[in-house]
Image (tube, coloured by chain):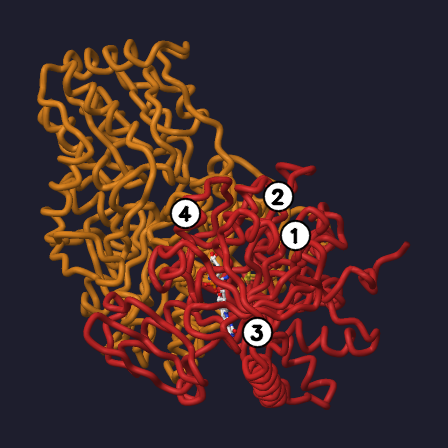
Chain colours: A red, B orange
Amino acid sequence: MNIGDRIVAWSKDEEIKKEGASGGLVTSLLTAALKGELVDEVIALQKVSEFEGVPIRTSNVDEVIKCSGSLHAAPINLTKFAVRFFEAHPDGTLALPAKPCDARGIIEQAKRKKINLEKTYLIGLNCGGTMPPITTMKMLEKMYEINPDDVIEEEIERGKLIFKTEKEEKAISIDELEEAGYGRRENCRYCETNIPVMTDVACGNWGAGKNETFVEIFTEKGLKLMNNAIELGLIETAPATEKGIKIREKTNSVMEKVAKKWHKKIFVPIEDRLERFHYYMDVMEDCIDCEACKYVCPVCACDESKCIDFYDPMDSHKISIYHLVRLLHISDSCIGCGQCTDVCPAEIPLTILHRRMADRIQAKYDYIPGMDMKIPPSFEVE
Amino acid sequence: MNKIVCPGCNLGCGLYMNDVLYFRKNAPVNSGKLCKFGMKLHKYEKALPMIGGKEEELSNVISAASKKLAETKDFAFVSFGNVTCEEQLAFTKLASTVGSDVYTCIPGFVGADIEKIRQSTEIITFIDPYTTYPLILRHMLYAKENGAKITSYYWKKIRIADESVILNPTEIDKIKSIDFGDSLVILDLNPLNLEFSNEIINSCNRENIVCLKPFLNSTGASLLSGGEKSIYQILDEIKEKKIKGLYLLESDPRIVPDDALLSALDKLDVLIVQQSAHNSLSDRANIVLPNDRTFEGKGTVLNFEGRALETEGKTEGIKIISEILKSAGKEETSYDSLHAEVLSKLGITEIDEYVVPEHNLVYKPETELKKYEGGSHLIYVYTPFLWNNTIDRDFVEISPGLAESLNLHKDGLLKMTSSKGSAAVKYKIVEDVPDNVVLSPMKLPISTDVITPIEFK
Ligand SMILES: Cc1cc2nc3c(=O)[nH]c(=O)nc-3n(C[C@H](O)[C@H](O)[C@H](O)COP(=O)(O)OP(=O)(O)OC[C@H]3O[C@@H](n4cnc5c(N)ncnc54)[C@H](O)[C@@H]3O)c2cc1C
Ligand code: SF4
């Protein structure tokens, strides 16, 4: 096996294979990393229901096994949990599943020395988007006429979102759902990174058969992860088929096009300066200064936050300086993960505001954050 | 990670916590959103078991408490609702052993639910949703986006409102002539402003009132404990020696605006506090019993809608109350039996956080709106967070007109005098506060009530 290889693989453990999203490979890579002592701990998402996952950090193999399966309606970013790991264990080693936005957050934190990337095994998950849980439950009742409690399985196939209960299976096209205001989170719709090429291995079901995962190996660490699991007898592999490779590439390029279309639809330029000014003013005035957006932001890495430093609640500004500093400070590193919009109690569309700024800055400096460790953050002074 | 409910107020925001705080994105009330209080909930200094200011073995403190309960006549029990339903019920059982009720100081009243805000077309609000109950704001924004008209009655302009009627203490009667029609009403029911909220409750269709409350389990507590006395009444009765012993469960009477009222506590024969935090109240108590931190108790919490929510954690508080019962020769209690009884009292068989059960709490508000003479007033615009010691604002808000008439300049101090003395405080200028009004998010030593007459000198 070599870097650059594209293969299909699955767990040899029947239970994991059955419970896993597509063959349980990721779960077996994680458990093998613990068993083979490649890592001290693993971060994974423990399933509470189809609509709820709790991030856990563990060295217990059984707990990792309980985390198998993909939770599409648990839009959590795991970056800050990885930061906490390295705060507690500066010399530790870690493995975790990572959607592109998890991986990009982790790389931006690694650039800011909050995560040791050399000691982090990133098992990439292809991602076509996540859904907000509460809205998704409402969608089930309205569009699918299914009680959310009855859902036993959910999957995405050929542009359709499928929900299964004990009795039935219903599929509706994602386009139709999104037209009706449901479906993926807004930022996921315009996210153009579906295959996490910045991780050690990218895993997904595109191009794979039933109960197998399509894997692309990118790094030495990725190779080590795979070989370790093979040596421990936990996974089985086969070369990817030409057809599979084509399907994966084609689906990816279709998804990229859809994302671009959404981007165009959402980011209508505001040419007039005054109008632009009011666009920001209007929504930001609702800010209640809770700083939740900063707390959850995966790329926010200051020990002493500049955004808070310049801000005084006693000032009578219409919008807080806090946001102005943040807009500027995050503009080089914002990865558009949507966590700030998700958390804001005042429903400020923060991700869009940040992306409007970041799109321009990142294009100007020709810098896409979170893609690799080669380029330092553009605002960093040596 | 433990699934918990944010103890900041009675909205019922879902969280997970261990060393990291994580927002439950599928929690029905907050959908993964959180306000300032929830963000900072881990800062607490733990209270230790004490007798007469000295640390003691817990078992000794339990015996001492039990002895005091037996020998002191006229004991009052207060629990605002900063504990789970299970602990509240255990406390109610304990109170009944000495023939007393538990007072929550907030009436049992459950109004409309969140969905009703989202579906309404006319909203009348009496709160500042930006600072008082921020997690309600997004539901109002949702309604507004769908065309709802929002009218605010408050001491200052409220940004989300299409129409802001600015209240002034001197014309407080204005609220009596509001035409509520079928509007949805958003109201804050808390121990300090009962006359105000009662007036509203009596003037409109109760089914249309969204009744927000300040403590983690205010609704559950008032459903399980029958005692109806205001915190002012309790302090008065202590002063008059009608109450001789007081047992406070995770409840701090220092919320009253006038600290002078607290001198009543010195008249008590015995003050028992059972609370998680060590503070000047526990320093003042004869007996201190520890408790699980508000967000660490296991059990059931009822939010302002009457929605039952589950919290994971410990049951130390319940065990302590059970030990006191045992030591008083009464029947012990346990979490499991309490939980079963709570479910049956709530009329449910299991906790489903996505369903709002019906609760029929009878509430007959009987108070008179206070009258305020002309002149200027200091208004204590308390928030639930303040009572959790989390407020970080040490300034008052005044109008540009007042700043100009007093010739105040940036970084200056506003000087005020009341019957209790003078204070000089930092201020912020905000639009549309009446020129004769000062809004304070903190309790100032010169306040005599929620609304205090003042002069600027
Ligand atoms: C939100 C999401 C969207 C996806 N979209 C696509 C897609 O469009 N195309 C495609 O080819 N593949 C997609 N995948 C990947 C695919 O669903 C499988 O995860 C992948 O094929 C590996 O399957 P497995 O059986 O080996 O994983 P498993 O053995 O089931 O392990 C999955 C691991 O992912 C973790 N996990 C589950 N949900 C999340 C989450 N929300 N965030 C972070 N980690 C999580 C679990 O903790 C577990 O450790 C997506 C995955 C997710 C989580
Ligand atoms: S989360 Fe929203 S309300 Fe809180 S600080 Fe950020 S923008 Fe302001």
Q: Tell me the number on the disc at residue A224.
A: 1
- Mark in the foreground, 4 or 1: 1
At label 4, the amino acid type is Gly
Q: Which mark is residue A240?
A: 3
Taking depth in this image into account, of A149 and B362 the one nearest to the observer is A149
Give the residue type at disc 3.
Ala
Name the secondary structure under disc 2.
Answer: loop
Q: Position of residue B13 (x, y in %)?
A: 38, 54
Q: Position of residue A45 (x, y in %)?
A: 46, 54
Distance from disc 2 to disc 4, alpha carbons, whole Å, reads 42 Å
Horizontal and vertical percent position of residue B401? 61, 64
Q: Which mark is residue A38?
A: 2
- Count of numbered circles on the image: 4
Q: In which chain is the residue bearing label 2? A: A
Q: Local crowd at mark 2 within 10 Å, few (<14), some, or many (≥20)?
A: many
Label 4, label 1: how far apart the Cα atoms are: 47 Å
Q: Say which quadrant the C terminus of chain B sits in.
A: top right
Q: Is residue A24 visible?
A: yes
The response on whether ligand 2 sits within 8 Å of label 4 is no
- Pointer 4 indicates a residue of which chain? B
Q: What's under tag 2, amino acid-wise?
A: Leu
Graded by Cα atoms within 10 Å as few (under 14), some (14 to 19) or many (20 or more), the crowding at tag 3 reads many
For residue B79, side relative to residue A197 (left or right): left
Comparing labels 2 and 4, the label whose residue is closer to the camera: 2
Q: Is residue B131 above or below residue A215?
A: above
Determine the residue positioned at 57% across, 60% down: A98
- Residue assigned mark 4: B8
Q: Tell which circle, 3 or 1, labels the residue nearer the N-terminal end.
A: 1
Where disc 4 sits, the SS reads: loop
Q: Quadrant of residue B305?
A: bottom left
**In this view of the protein, which residue sits in the foreground, B299 or B174?**
B299
